[in-house]
Amino acid sequence: DRFPLDSSTRDPIALRVIEALDQLPEENQLDTECLYYRGEALRAMQQYEEALTCLERATHQHPEQVHTWLAIGWCEKRCNRIDQAIAAMEQALNVDPDDTLVQYNLACYWSLAGELDNALEYLRLASSSDKHYLNLVDAESDFDAIRAEPQFRQLLSSLADN
């Protein structure tokens, strides 16, 4: 989101990925990796519903792939289904409870859902393990819903001090 490509650059690259996948034998096109890459190409073209179809099929085959759950959450958020985005991140946490990117995304999605306590807990977890996430908070519009809350400012202050 922070470095978007113009569709005139992005879409031809994504379409080339899809064309390459289409050239594989049909049985290979249903492999987890192929479904994931097709989903990512569709996601890049902002075809989120179509991307979700591929990504969800990939998770049915291999639910232990955190990156696929992250992509699903990303698409669900952009389809304005925050509850589904949260559910995808919770699935990712079941796979890897210490994944800081998943924790950070959960903080964002809980903030969008208006759940201050959950948002703060996941932001604390992610930022305690990786201070890099603190650098993202100011520019992250997902936190706008809770940015004025005293607990939010207090958490950021305490994390910055540690």
Image (cartoon, rainbow, N blue to C red):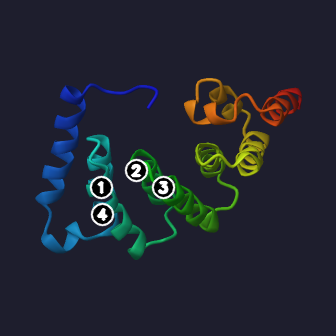
Measuring 34% from the left and 59% from the top, which residue is drawn there? 52
Residue 49's disc number: 1
User: Can you identify the residue that label 3 sits on?
Assistant: 67
Percent from the top left, x then y, of residue 5? Answer: 31, 27
Depth order, front residue of 92/155: 155
Task: Determine whether label 1 and label 4 are within 8 Å by CB.
Answer: yes
Percent from the top left, x then y, of residue 78? Answer: 41, 45
Number of residues whose C-alpha sits closer than 10 Å to that of mark 4, classed few (under 14), some (14–19) or many (20 or more): some
- Cα–Cα gap, marks 1 and 4: 7 Å
Side (left or right) of 1 relative to 122: left
Q: Is residue 11 above or below residue 49?
A: above
Side (left or right) of 33 relative to 121: left
- Cα–Cα gap, marks 1 and 3: 18 Å
Q: Amino acid at mark 2?
A: Cys
Q: Is residue 6 above or below residue 106?
A: above
Q: Amino acid at mark 3?
A: His
- Cα–Cα gap, marks 2 and 4: 11 Å
User: Can you identify the residue that label 4 sits on?
Assistant: 53
User: Can you identify the residue that label 2 sits on?
Assistant: 75
Q: Is residue 80 above or below residue 88?
A: above
| Sequence-first disc among 1 and 3 | 1
Front: mark 1 or 4: 1
- Cα–Cα gap, marks 2 and 1: 8 Å
Percent from the top left, x then y, of residue 149? Answer: 77, 33
Task: Determine the image quadrant of residue 38.
Answer: bottom left
